[in-house]
Image: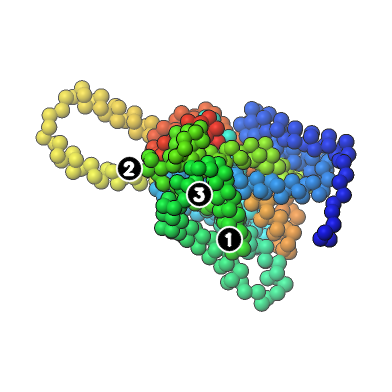
Amino acid sequence: MAGGFLPYHEPGTVDILIIISFFFFLSLAKWVSAKVIQAGIIGQIAVGIIYGVPLADILEHNWQKTFSVLGYIGLILIIFEGGLGTRVDLLKQNFILSMIGAATGVVFPIGLSFPLLYLGFGYGAVETFIIGASLSATSLGTTFAVISSASGSVNLAETRVGSVLVSAAVIDDVVGLVMLSVIGDLGEISEDGHVNLGWLIGRPIVASIAMAIVTPIVTKWVFAPFFRTFIEYHFARFDHISNIILMTLVLSAFVAIAGFTGTSVLFGAFLAGVFISYLPSKHPEGPFVVMSREEGEREADKSPTFIHTFEKYLLGTQQYLMEPLFFASIGFAIPFVQLWTGKRIWRGVVYTLLMAFAKCIVGIWVPIWQLARLHKSHDKEPSDQHKTRGEPKNENNSTSDDDQSTQRKGDRWKRAWLAAALLGSAMVARGEIGLLIIEIGHNETPYVSEEGFITGVWAILLNTIIGPITVGLLVRFYAEKIEEGEWGVQESSMPVSSHSDANAHGAV
């Protein structure tokens, strides 16, 4: 009751040792799995399975619930950081390609689920749709974690393929959470025929589209001009303090707006990061245009950027506390023991392979897009050739030029297919949203059976393992080629921070 107090009790020795061992093994498992399979998050999920309800149940249930909440805040911070480091210019340039890729990543998992689950395994039609919907959502948290872990080798956020990946993953996530909202009320629909189905389905869709349209408009024409005219020069007096206050207020506002309007709070967190990053002026004399965090802190008329402030105040907590708890909380939600029967294993593996293909196919749009652009460029070539038709050519030089041109085209196509493989494999991980959708479908509606639930969990779990491992191996062996060419790192009009932390993490 209000006015009382919580009596203080010293934690027991066993409790202290359990918590210490839990966080120690989270860090150790991340390091080991990063070294062995190039995907540190897999080790943290495994620790969550062991310490949580699925296996040993070492942690008390109220601790697991608390860690799940803290982990979700960590997920919000991961996505907020991703929004802060997103190249808005690349998002605009590749928006159409991202939309096509996202649509493919939603339609194929649901569409391919029906031949296997409905016709092959005999699951119900609504059950098949719910399971397919859970496999249509790309894990935003895993995507940004993979981009961050790869930043030591290649700055994926500065690449064109990385921009397409982020945009497609965000769109997939929003679509997945819209379907989550609908699926969550399917049980209510089955009991009450008077539910307004149009409003039920339309509300999250309208809210998501409205936020996606209104946010860039008001940012560009209202908030950014106001900030640049009246606020940003005053921020230089307080450096990180003013930055962190504004970041907290904006993130809280976007999360609240997204949550209460019926769309995804994760989408709101991403928009908040993009909103913040767009506010400062980009001209060389602007307070936020600095070459390093030290320059922003040292110069009286300069200010550290918002990503610098994130590094100073939040990055350590996110990396070593919140992010591990998020991936451990995914482990808490996996019904590990129930997975291990022969029928469930082979069905899960077959569905896993089909769902991996359903997301990998997104990458095919990279070479198709490049082929379309080459056709456009070929349409312009005849007029150029007509102009040079009367010019004499040296035969040897012509042969040499042809060989070089063929080699360049070959290298261009190799880079395109590498970018396709990277995009497709990075979209494979499902993670938190997939588990959320299928658990709500199983627990809150009468449609998803135990067998269907286990089959879906197998696919979500294995795809969340396969995706980061594949991306890690691609980055490890082909980092230089990923950075090159039209799908690689793109030039930015903004100075690049020379601070070591910015290089390692600010790119996310």
Q: Secondary structure at mark 3?
A: helix
- For the N terminus, the quadrant is bottom right
For the residue marked with disc 3, what is the amino acid? Ile
Q: Is residue 478 left or right of residue 127?
A: left
Percent coordinates x, y for residue 253 in the rendering: 58, 57
Q: Amino acid at mark 2?
A: Leu
Q: Which mark is residue 257?
A: 1
Residue drawn at point x = 80 percent, y = 38 percent = 19
Task: Determine contact: label 3, label 2, CB under 8 Å.
Answer: no
Q: Earlier in the sequence, mark 1 or mark 3?
A: 1
Q: Residue at x 73, y 38 (%)?
A: 46
Instruction: Give the label on residue 374, or none.
Output: 2
Label 3: which residue?
276
Q: CA distance from mark 1 to mark 3?
A: 16 Å
Amino acid, disc 1: Ile
Distance from disc 3 to disc 2, alpha carbons, whole Å, reads 37 Å
